[in-house]
Image (tube, grey):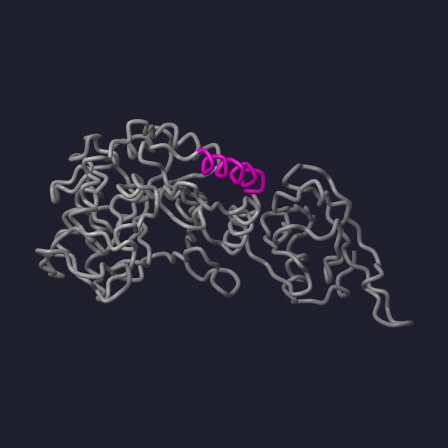
Amino acid sequence: MLFQDERFGMFIHWGLYSIHGWHEQEQWRKNIAKEEYETLVKQFDPKEFCIDEWLELVKEAGMEYICFTTKHHDGFCMWDTKYTEYNIMNTPYHKDILREVADGCARHGIKLALYYSCPDWHYKHSVNFGGDHQLARPNPGDEPNEELYKEYIRNQMTELLGNYGKIDALFWDIPPYNRDESMNAFVRGLQPGILINNRGYSEGDYSTPERSVPSGSCFTRLTEACQSVSAASWGYRADDDYYSNLFLMQSIDNIMCRGGNYLLNVGPDALGRIPKESAEKIRTVGNWYRKVRESYQKAEWIHHPDIPCRMTVRDRYLYLHFDGVAVSSGFSLRPLNLVPRSAIVLNTGEEIAAKVEYLPYNFTAPGAPMPEYLHINRIPVDELTKELIVLRLEFEDVESVKAILNNNVRGGDLLL
């Protein structure tokens, strides 16, 4: 089930905006008139689009689902909809892209979520709800009407959630000014069991922090963070600014350690190709993720202020997650004083040293007790400067480990 077994997904922003390769909100950010922007329909012809190639990349990266943009803010629809002519069937491509995506996901065993924008810069009854992402001026001939626009959305949801098989999640975007619980109820009637995010007409089932990590510790509700490989755009951008691999690994780790899902976005170009640089970044980050994935799956967040790394626990294992580049080949896990049965670097499978001992930096004062704590060392930090390091320590009694780290007992109260 999504948010339990499937934790890592690919976000895909793709539409008319890929033609110019500037930004997915080009129409708004450049204040382009509707009649000018919409001429792009006559140019959109992604002849090199191959869903199987996309999904092979998804699987290679260890991703388990995708979230596909069916309609972004510009209102252009990437499926065969009968409720507007502003759709993929009226381009030179003239094929239902969402059908190809849905059928491909079914073939490859990849779960499918759909993105749908609440703002719509094309549809004449779309309403400026008072939020952001609205055009500077109404389009000529617009007749804003909230009820007629919601009827349009319900009609399109009937198509999206009725014609493309099982849809696991719905990602609304940009919450309307007015909330309406009946909209999510309508969606659930079409796809029982679907998960709905918090950017639509009510709070839904899960939160969606974007390009940031909320303050606090573990998440108190289902959470799916989203980030793009690009620092400047979600849609295709020529000559893009890419995040470093280590930054993305750190971002994923920060979210997943706390129990969240992670959507990593790419923007295919106008021909339907995922850019070479984006694909290589997905492969590199995915290769790291597959090696350390077990440290997030059904794992519990655990925290102690004296231990300089994130920690998760699962079964017999305590996982130590370095935040960015590791600064030292060893450190003390004060107040933990239990010896693990084994200690390895998940990135490489390499064994490292682990023993309980008194260290110079545990000194307090002459004549004071000499406390012994677990010392982990011989970590290959210089060999792994391009990856976020995750260590796995196996214990006979992991509950005792959790008790110490949760401050339920002092480290010195447990005997080896």
Quarter of the image with the C terminus in it: bottom right
Q: Is residue 146 visible?
A: yes
Magenta span: chief secondary structure: helix
Q: Give the number of callouts.
A: 0
**Residue 23: x %, y % from top left:** 34, 48
Using the image, determine if residue 89 lies above or below residue 372. Answer: above
**Residue 30: x %, y % from top left:** 28, 53
Query: Which residue sits at x=28%, y=27%?
Result: 47
Using the image, determine if residue 153 lies above or below residue 307. Answer: above
**Residue 370: x %, y % from top left:** 86, 65
Out of 29 and 60, give the one closest to the viewer: 29
Query: Over which residues does the magenta segment extend?
Result: 276-293
**Residue 46: x %, y % from top left:** 28, 31
Residue 288 lies in the magenta-colored region? yes
Out of 103 and 397, give the one closest to the viewer: 103
Query: Which residue sits at x=46%, y=58%?
Result: 212
Seen as rendered, the residue at the extreme right is 367
Report whether 251 appears left or right of 358: left
Q: Quadrant of residue 52?
A: top left
Quarter of the image with the N terminus in it: top left
Using the image, determine if residue 69 lies above or below residue 55. Answer: below
Residue 279 lies in the magenta-colored region? yes
Q: Is residue 342 visible?
A: no
Out of 395 and 255, give the one closest to the viewer: 255
Query: Which residue sits at x=91%, y=72%?
Result: 366
Query: Which residue sits at x=61%, y=56%?
Result: 310
Q: Quadrant of residue 359?
A: bottom right
Report whether 215 appears left or right of 21: right
Using the image, determine if residue 369 lies above or below residue 273. Answer: below
